[in-house]
Image (tube, rainbow, N blue to C red):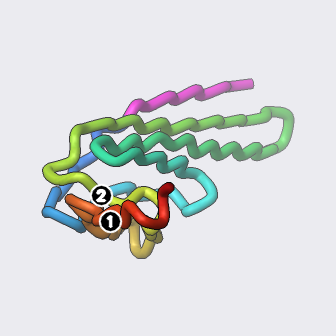
Amino acid sequence: MAFVLQHDRMAIQLNVYETKQTAQVPGFTEQDIDLRVDSQRLYITGKHEESSKEKKEKSVYSEWQAKQLFREFDLPTAIDPDNVKAHVKNGVLEITMPKREKTKKIDLAETS
């Protein structure tokens, strides 16, 4: 009986632009990834597990594999966290983050 255990922590390759980021996440699906943002910071975490079991005559072969990823970084500009959109396609996580308004006019008559 043989057991193979593999646990990898992946480094994420990122391309960071002003309002769009892409990250290489091969083998991960949208369900495997947790994405969190605030106005100045992006957090990407993920976990993907696979297992297989094969029986041949009197021996059993089992394999279990887990991949994890984690990355956090400061964003180049303030973004609107309520309007962030993301999806995974062909092993690439694409995140679109619109800029946050720098200033907002407050009508004094409405606040009294």
User: Dot 2: what SS?
Assistant: loop
Q: Is residue 5 magenta?
A: yes
Residue at the spot x=31%, y=41% of the render? 41
| Residue 86, above or below 73 | below
| Residue 59, above or below 95 | above
Disc 2 target residue = 79
Expressed as whole percent of the image width and height from the top left, the position of residue 52 reads 71, 46
Q: Amino acid at mark 2?
A: Ile
Q: What is the C-alpha distance between the residues marked 2 and 1?
A: 6 Å
Dots 2, 1 in contact, CB < 8 A: yes
- The prevailing secondary structure element of the residues shown in magenta is strand
Q: Nearer the viewer, mark 2 or mark 1?
A: 2
Question: Nearest the camera: 24 or 78?
Answer: 78
Dot label at residue 85: none
Camera sees residue 31:
yes
Disc 1 target residue = 97
Question: Nearest the camera: 9 or 30?
Answer: 30
Q: Is residue 80 magenta?
A: no
Expressed as whole percent of the image width and height from the top left, the position of residue 83 reads 45, 68
Expressed as whole percent of the image width and height from the top left, the position of residue 53 reads 76, 43
Q: Quadrant of residue 21?
A: bottom left
Q: Is residue 90 left or right of residue 105?
A: right
Residue at the spot x=48%, y=57% of the render? 111
Q: Which residues are magenta?
A: 1-9
Instruction: State which tag comes first along the sequence, 2 or 1.
Output: 2
